Image (spheres, grey):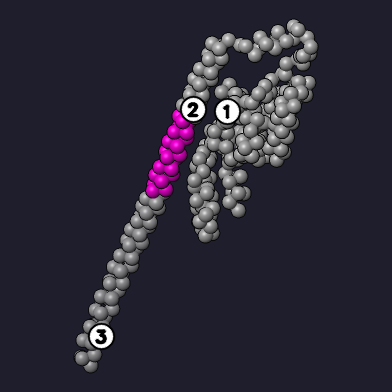
């Protein structure tokens, strides 16, 4: 049951996530499923891009399989150094990512996503192709994934080189002997990119957590206001009921006194007989 509830939770919009999480956790506790309640309560609200990918995977069940299958074929092509096959699959990769990005935006009802969201979608889909572990997590993501790639993954493969060709050997040698400075610069740039990406992910998680806390506090405040309003209404109703009871009591007291007076008068007349 918890898996089905998590599916429904990760499919709702980020704005609805916190309230839906609280509702599902409460429902699990009410039926006595404490384990499910803990799993649900421990979930983190996804970013917009992560939610879009989650909804894609949940509404299009073949998404994970298609990404994983392409990744498997690309890895095999790279391992066999089959340049023609790599180029063929690279084209297939670009088409698949474009197709799934369109489907994801349609599923999320987004017609004009920001450039950042679109880049995050592309990066996550590429990461799912490159890493089977990521493709398995689609539907449960809380943030977009980054594609580090492997080998020439996703890029067009170089033309095949005839080993007996002297120009080809010189070209191959020149490629192998790229300047160390360029490699160092590339590594430094990659480290800076990774550092900034990590900082961004940390900031997004902190914001998501702050949004969760704020939403929970707002929900608590709204619940307290509702209880207060209900108490005020109950108090007013009780006051009205009390006023009515006091009026009825006064009428009853007046009737009792009139009856007592009649009894006294009747006794007085009886004594005269």
Residue under label 1: 146
In the foreground, 56 or 238: 56
Q: CA distance from mark 1 to mark 3?
A: 103 Å
The disc at residue 198 is 2
| Quarter containing the C terminus | bottom left
Q: Residue at x 62, y 37 (%)?
A: 133
Magenta-drawn stretch contains 167: no
In the foreground, 225 or 55: 55
Badge 3: residue crowd in 10 Å (few <14, some 14–19, many ≥20) = few
Q: Which residues are magenta?
A: 202-225
- Answer with left or right where residue 14 lies relative to residue 272: right
Q: Secondary structure at mark 2?
A: helix
Q: Secondary structure at mark 3?
A: helix
Residue found at the very far top of the displayed protein: 167
Which mark is first along the chain, 2 or 3? 2
Where is residue 90? Give x, y as percent. 73, 23
Q: Is residue 211 visible?
A: no
In the foreground, 138 or 21: 138
- Residue 183 to residue 126: above or below: above
- Residue 35 to residue 222: above or below: below
Q: Residue at x 65, y 36 (%)?
A: 132
Q: CA distance from mark 1 to mark 2?
A: 10 Å
- Answer with left or right where residue 160 lies relative to residue 194: right
What is the count of numbered marks? 3
Asked if labels 2 and 1 touch by Cβ distance under 8 angstroms, the answer is no
Residue under label 3: 266
* Magenta span main SS: helix
Magenta-drawn stretch contains 211: yes
In the foreground, 34 or 154: 154
Where is residue 143? Give x, y as percent. 54, 33
């Amino acid at each position: 049951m918890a898996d089905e509830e998590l599916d429904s939770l990760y499919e709702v919009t980020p704005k609805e996530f916190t309230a839906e999480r609280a509702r599902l956790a409460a429902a699990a506790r009410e039926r006595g499923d404490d384990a499910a309640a803990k799993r649900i309560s421990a979930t983190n609200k996804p970013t917009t891009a992560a939610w879009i990918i989650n909804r894609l995977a949940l509404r299009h069940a073949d998404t994970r399989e298609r990404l994983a299958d392409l990744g498997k074929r690309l890895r095999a092509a790279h391992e066999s150094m089959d340049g023609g096959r790599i180029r063929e699959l690279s084209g297939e990769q670009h088409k698949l990512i474009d197709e799934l990005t369109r489907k994801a935006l349609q599923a999320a009802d987004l017609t004009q996503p920001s450039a950042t969201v679109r880049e995050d979608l592309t990066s996550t889909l590429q990461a799912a192709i490159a890493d089977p572990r990521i493709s398995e997590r689609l539907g449960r993501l809380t943030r977009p994934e980054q594609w580090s790639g492997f080998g020439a993954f996703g890029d067009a493969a170089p033309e095949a080189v005839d080993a007996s060709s002297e120009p080809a050997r010189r070209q191959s040698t020149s490629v192998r002997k790229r300047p160390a400075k360029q490699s160092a610069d590339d590594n430094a740039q990659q480290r800076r990119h990774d550092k900034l990406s990590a900082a961004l992910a940390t900031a997004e998680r902190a914001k998501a957590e702050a949004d969760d806390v704020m939403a929970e506090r707002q929900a608590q405040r709204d619940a307290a206001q509702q209880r207060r309003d209900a108490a005020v209404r109950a108090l007013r109703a009780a006051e009205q009921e009390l006023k009515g009871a006091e009026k009825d009591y006064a009428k009853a007291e007046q009737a009792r006194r009139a009856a007592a007076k009649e009894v006294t008068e009747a006794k007085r007349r009886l004594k005269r007989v």
